[in-house]
Image: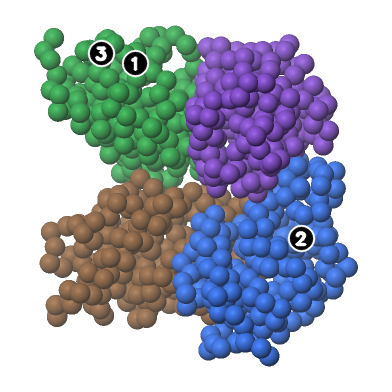
Chain colours: A purple, B green, C brown, D blue
Amino acid sequence: MPLFDITRYAQAAESIIDAGRFLYGRGWSPATSSNYSARIDAGHIAITVSGRHKGELGAGDVMVVDLSGQAVQSQCRSSAETRLHTVLYELFPDVGAVLHTHSVNATVLSRILPPQQSLQLQGYELQKAFPGHDTHEDTLVVPVFDNTQDIPQLAEQTKQWFRDHPDQPGYLIRGHGLYTWGRTMADCLRHVEAFEFLFECELATMRLRP
Amino acid sequence: MPLFDITRYAQAAESIIDAGRFLYGRGWSPATSSNYSARIDAGHIAITVSGRHKGELGAGDVMVVDLSGQAVQSQCRSSAETRLHTVLYELFPDVGAVLHTHSVNATVLSRILPPQQSLQLQGYELQKAFPGHDTHEDTLVVPVFDNTQDIPQLAEQTKQWFRDHPDQPGYLIRGHGLYTWGRTMADCLRHVEAFEFLFECELATMRLRP
Amino acid sequence: MPLFDITRYAQAAESIIDAGRFLYGRGWSPATSSNYSARIDAGHIAITVSGRHKGELGAGDVMVVDLSGQAVQSQCRSSAETRLHTVLYELFPDVGAVLHTHSVNATVLSRILPPQQSLQLQGYELQKAFPGHDTHEDTLVVPVFDNTQDIPQLAEQTKQWFRDHPDQPGYLIRGHGLYTWGRTMADCLRHVEAFEFLFECELATMRLRP
Amino acid sequence: MPLFDITRYAQAAESIIDAGRFLYGRGWSPATSSNYSARIDAGHIAITVSGRHKGELGAGDVMVVDLSGQAVQSQCRSSAETRLHTVLYELFPDVGAVLHTHSVNATVLSRILPPQQSLQLQGYELQKAFPGHDTHEDTLVVPVFDNTQDIPQLAEQTKQWFRDHPDQPGYLIRGHGLYTWGRTMADCLRHVEAFEFLFECELATMRLRP
């Protein structure tokens, strides 16, 4: 396997560190939860080391893995959920960043939905924050996968679902949080913000119309 | 058409950039939503370029349009909702700033209200934040327009409604957010704050008296 | 009437400016609402000028009034609610600061309580934040006065109630907000924090046990 | 009793001061509530002086006590709840920090639970923030003790409960707040964050499924 470009690694790591400061500050990555990645090239991504404080990421907290999830030039251990990231980079060549966050609203919403039921969002102007969604009249579908400690199996499930639904921009894991992605880290952060906004709207509405 | 004064443009742009930092920081302009404008003179306004991050606006993110919404001395594209701003500057010669924000509370409240029903606010001391509203015993009427991607038509609707109700200081678009205005940007920001306060109060009350 | 000491005025004004930055930052004084005062001596208080942005108070935004509410050495107009402050300084010689805040929770709670019913707080450890309240088993009584634009009359009502209940540390005005006081500005800010905490607890509990 | 090492005291105090700034900033230690401690050695801990503002702790606000709770080399008075800290250091030799916080959510949740009922958390990925909890399928048990001003008696109760349940990482006092601990201050802060996240999830869920 060819070596990766060090400058691209450094830039990917910097985008992850900055994203962490923002996401932790918003309360969406508490207590060392969450993991983030950014693409270096066709075969490598930068990804957070397991168990680090997401608001205080530093140079030593981002490592490199290949698309099979193996550490490259590193003794560190990447997140147990690394494979959930790499399947998305495999599936979508134009994806440049993947963020997994862990907010109260994503957690509560994913637990309150009946089993097998996806979250369907309709009539929100903010749906237009996602590429290919040009009107509030579209329906945004957010599948909810059951939580498991068997990550390879969950990775397969998500890979299959998004192969069939390439226009949908994210998913929830029950009691666990959100995965979303984008061409750039800025796009991906916009998607997190938009999802969190929509989750909060949905929960606020459910409280008024139980 | 006469040229506009550059210093007035620069000041208008600065007031918009500062407003963006504040409004994004409060969570009222997430995910590149919202658009803001400030009057330069009788025929020109400064307005945000389409699709920019509202908490990180810079010199290149504010452009000039005339009151028909056409870009002036610029290759940029202004917000798709530019016409919603310009009708207000046409209608009210003393309006100096218009802010469109996109909060969770404005979104939820505008979706929960029955069709054709405006939001009516009464008994709040904070109603006095709006000019011409001198007592909590007044009624503040906030019309809710249906969301649409046909902006010229919505612009006409709002123009007509506010021609008939010049003392009312803002409106909602369903699932989309708030429009409000003021003589100065400071006045306009006070109106956003007051509306957001009142929306939060209304929703909190509805949760207690469903 | 003897002149007041200028250094004491400057220190009182500084404590008010700092309090404003804190209280506005917490969202408890939005949209130029609220007013704050601090005692200079037996006959004078420093108090906010009417209608100023409470998060951006400066040297020109705090004036001096005597205990009848008349401006001293100033052309500014103090808050319309000045008399609500001065009756407390008259009544309690050891009061050094009075804060009136205007939070969503105080507003909603004061509107939801039935007419003539005070808010009664019991079983909260944080009741001990108020002097003379040494156990969570005490009952804290917070009277709720109807809002009015007739401030002298409301001032008399509050004066009478607190003459009879000198151990109670604050009151609500319906749809309007909180008044509380303390020996020092630090004490008074602690009381605001404690009240806001308790209001939030009460509302959260009501949402669970409607 | 041997003297304690001054450098270890200074480091423990620094970790407490930093923790206070963080916890107060999150709203979890309002109005001079809460108390924090960190171990110096087998026989001494650093602990906050009674009644101080937790967001503004300075060098004079942290003192030393031995494990019986007696002040060492100090005229200050430690928190009335000191004994709740020292029993944990006695019981668990590897505990390096204990934090007692006082959030709205902990207060409301502890009051809403029926007497004698502990809080049981299950199905949350974030349970893995606690050592020895490796899957969301575990059950986290958080006992709720009745509030009392008789601290020695409550200290005994907690000591007994945790002697029997050494794997459980915290407890609630009704209407009063959370106690949690960890090997290091960073671990302990992670536990506070995780508990606060879980409390917020539980309350949000109860509001949807009353």
| Residue B73 as seen in the image, left or right of residue A196 | left
Q: CA distance from mark 1 to mark 2?
A: 54 Å
Q: Which is more toward the observer, C60 or B174?
A: C60
Q: CA distance from mark 3 to mark 2?
A: 61 Å
Q: Chain of mark 3?
A: B
Q: Which residue is mark 3?
A: B74
- Callout 2 environment at 10 Å: few (<14), some (14 to 19), or many (20+)? many
- How far from the left and from the top, in percent, is residue B177? 46, 27
- At x 53%, y 12%, the residue is A134
Q: Are marks 1 and 3 on the same chain?
A: yes
- At x 68%, y 90%, the residue is D1
Q: Give the residue at the far front of this rendering.
A: A2
Q: Are marks 1 and 2 in contact (CB under 8 Å)?
A: no
- How far from the left and from the top, in percent, is residue A4? 58, 25
Tag 1: amino acid:
Ser
| Residue C104 as seen in the image, left or right of residue B56 | right
Q: Which residue is mark 2?
A: D169
Q: CA distance from mark 1 to mark 3?
A: 10 Å
> From the viewer's perspective, is residue B163 above or below residue D39?
above
Q: Are marks 3 and 2 in contact (CB under 8 Å)?
A: no
Q: Which is more toward the observer, D156 or C106?
A: D156
Q: Which is more toward the observer, B100 or A157?
A: A157
Where, quadrant-wise, is the N terminus of chain A in this rendering?
top right
Q: Chain of mark 2?
A: D
